[in-house]
């Protein structure tokens, strides 16, 4: 049976900024993309620190949820076709596991499979400042075909809230998979000046 609906793996790891993963799930639901979710234990702690959202409410945003320890889940197989995987946010631990090919959980295993199948892997890496180890891990993932996309606010969009900044960053990440989310974009009505630079 042919799969017509686009599907994507969403990973949420234990870095600050769980709002990015939550918003990705919400936006993908709005455009009818099938989501397959895996959440780390540390991400569950972050959820309780940074949001009022309950565990079940987060899980309900995805079409399918997989336990972190289930390394044999369907998303760990290259024969399971997806457009790729977004990890939002991506912690240093998760980045490092992907960079070295050490897959200790379904989260890093699914990312490794996405890379080996030459599908798109986008990491919304959340750490600053960066030491050389971080930079080397980011370089390694980039050399393997992954995309490192720290969620950098686009102030030209004149956001009115943190939610608008989160939405803009997530929509830009989803652009990389070919999903069209309606957000303010550069050259669409922004003031420009020849003296701006």
Image (cartoon, rainbow, N blue to C red):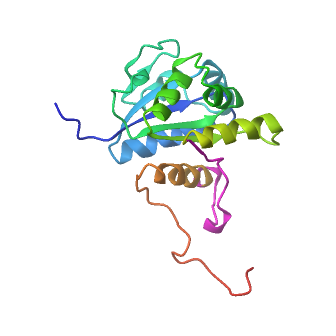
Q: Nearer the viewer, residue 142 or 172?
A: 142
The vertical placement of 31 against 127, above or below, is: below
Residue 180 visible in rendering: yes
Return the x and y of residue 68 as percentages of the image width and height.
Answer: 52, 16
Q: Residue at x 50, y 52 (%)?
A: 171
Return the x and y of residue 182 as percentages of the image width and height.
Answer: 44, 60
Quadrant of the frame with the C terminus? bottom right
Residue 18 visible in rendering: no
Q: Residue at x 67, y 33 (%)?
A: 50
Q: Residue furthest bottom?
A: 194
Return the x and y of residue 82 as percentages of the image width and height.
Answer: 37, 36
Left or right for 150, reference 81? right
The vertical placement of 43 against 67, above or below, is: below
Q: Nearer the viewer, residue 140 or 36?
A: 140
Return the x and y of residue 124 as percentages of the image width and height.
Answer: 61, 42
Number of marks in the rendered image: 0
Q: Is residue 147 covered in magenta?
A: yes
Q: Is residue 154 covered in magenta?
A: yes
Quadrant of the frame with the N terminus? top left
Q: Residue at x 48, y 49 (%)?
A: 174
Q: Which residues are magenta?
A: 146-164
Left or right for 91, reference 57? right
Q: Residue at x 64, y 55 (%)?
A: 161
């Amino acid at each position: 049976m042919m799969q017509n609906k686009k599907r994507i793996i969403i990973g949420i790891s234990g870095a600050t900024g769980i709002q990015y993963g939550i918003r990705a799930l919400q936006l993908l639901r709005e455009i009818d993309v099938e989501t397959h979710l895996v959440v780390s234990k540390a991400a569950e702690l972050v959820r309780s620190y940074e949001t009022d959202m309950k565990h079940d409410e987060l899980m309900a945003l995805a079409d399918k949820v997989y336990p972190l320890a289930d390394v044999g889940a369907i998303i760990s197989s290259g024969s399971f076709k997806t457009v790729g995987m977004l990890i939002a946010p991506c912690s240093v631990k998760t980045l490092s596991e992907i960079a070295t090919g050490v897959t200790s959980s379904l989260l890093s295993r699914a990312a490794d499979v996405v890379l080996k199948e030459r599908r798109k892997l986008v990491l919304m890496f959340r750490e600053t400042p960066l030491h050389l180890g971080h930079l080397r891990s980011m370089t390694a993932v980039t050399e393997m075909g992954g995309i490192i996309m720290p969620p950098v606010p686009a102030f030209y969009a004149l956001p009115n809230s943190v939610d608008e900044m989160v939405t803009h960053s997530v929509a830009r990440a989803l652009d990389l998979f070919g999903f069209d989310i309606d957000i303010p974009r550069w050259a669409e009505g922004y003031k420009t000046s020849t003296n701006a630079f």
